[in-house]
Amino acid sequence: MAVIAIAAFAGLSFRLMTLKTTSPHIALPAFEPFCSTGDSLCLGFADIPFSVSVDCGQEAPDLVALVDGQPAPEALGGAYPDYVFSGSFAVGMHELVLQVTDSCGQTAAETLSFEVVDCQAPGVGWVFGQSYWYYPVNPPHDVDGDGELDYGAVEVQGEDFAMQIGMDCSPPVTYSIHILTEVMDGTDIPSPDQSSIFVTCLECSYNTIVRIYAWDSVYNPYSLQPDSTLGGPNFVFHDAQLFVYDLFSICICEIYFTNISGTIELDYEGVDSVQVILSGDANSMQLTEQGSFSFNNVAMGQDYTITPYKNDNLKNGVSTFDAILINKHILSVYTIPNPYKLIAADVNKSKTITVQDIILIRKLILNLIDTFPNNTSWRFVPKSYVFPVLTNPWFEDFPEQKVFTDLDGGTTNADFVAIKIGDVNGSANANQ
Ligand SMILES: [Ca+2]
Ligand SMILES: [Ca+2]
Ligand SMILES: [Ca+2]
Ligand SMILES: [Ca+2]
């Protein structure tokens, strides 16, 4: 503050007047931390506007900026009274001192801190899958805390799924690993704490998708975390396949066995000596006895197909009478009563009933042929199959096998309806 004395000699009075002027003033707005994004030098652009007011002198005041103790004239822009301090600064906290001197020589200074924050997630090259095998847990104990004693386990590190890591401004980069389904259903909210998981002998082989996170070591107030809070490290994630094998037969793999059984009936009578073929994850064959079969000790959870086959006694139930019925059917004076008998009438397996089928029956009766070209002597349709159009069994391809995917426990039924080819009136003997 300056005091100016003005003396007035005019007249007899003497007066002393004091005139008060104020120091310059720097007005700073509030500002948030600045981000560094994808800069290999870890610089971030900071931008702080401010204004200056002086009430002494006509000229613009002198302005000086010091960043971390160093003059930074290039960082000042603008003109009295509105200025901006800006530039690229390294990730971290910085101290800025702004000094202003007006033309009367009065000064003011403001000191403030600003922060440049690493807002960039780590750059990681990922692998698409990793394979492991179980190691013995010796002596057996519960390594994963699920209450079950573990005989074999493997610790899988999230880091194993990172092939290469680029530079990050906030090292170290750490990894966490999570089971994708647990992330999706909310039972596991990813955080940097879970750097590894244990996979124990739950199954003989284990195959799942894991979600791997890479986290840097900064606190970025703008980073939305997996738990939906704002502020924390920057991160990136990747989904990969995890395989664990019981290469050394450490795990006591519990396989449960079950049965597939069924009956094969012709007009509600069991058909003998049908070859029933089990294929898929196991292969076996047996002959029906009084129309029944049963595959015992089939592993649960696997995929199987049951296919009946019988191609003997071509003449069984086939007579001139069948040829007459087929002819009447063609002439629309008789209707073959059900889809199974329609299939029986299609002797040449053409998906149509024509005079060609009658010709084959006549040749069979005359012993001119001993096989049906393109057809077996019996066909079998799963009993559970419902023909969409009863008068046209060829409306869609009907199944002649029974397929089981991920076989359940308990006894599974695989019943079939038998069809004796050429026998339209149901005279065939089921026991031949
Ligand atoms: Ca970073
Ligand atoms: Ca356990
Ligand atoms: Ca035919
Ligand atoms: Ca017949």
Image (spheres, helix red, strand yellow):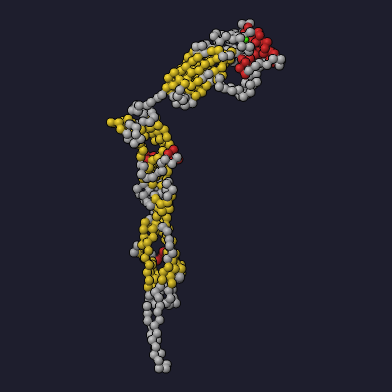
- In percent of width and height, residue 101 lies at 39, 73
Quadrant in which residue 345 is drawn: top right
Quadrant in which residue 201 is drawn: top left
Residue found at the very far left of the displayed protein: 139
As rendered, which of 385 and 370 lies closer to the eye? 385
As rendered, which of 402 and 135 lies closer to the eye? 402
28 left or right of 423 in image: left
Count of residue discs: 0
195 left or right of 261 in image: left
Q: Quadrant location of the C terminus?
A: top right
Residue 91 vs 85, above or below: the answer is above
Residue found at the very far bottom of the displayed protein: 11
Residue at position x 38%, y 32% in the image? 244
Residue 244 vs 393, above or below: the answer is below
Q: Examine the rendering and report whether any part of residue 288 can be seen.
A: yes
- In percent of width and height, residue 279 lies at 48, 20
Residue at position x 37%, y 69% in the image? 109
308 left or right of 129 in image: right
Residue at position x 40%, y 81% in the image? 19
Q: Examine the rendering and report whether any part of residue 223 can be seen.
A: no
Residue 314 vs 70, above or below: the answer is above
- In percent of width and height, residue 92 lies at 36, 56
As rendered, which of 33 and 38 lies closer to the eye? 33
Residue 390 vs 62, above or below: the answer is above
Q: Quadrant location of the N terminus?
A: bottom left
Residue at position x 43%, y 61% in the image? 31
- In percent of width and height, residue 284 lies at 46, 17
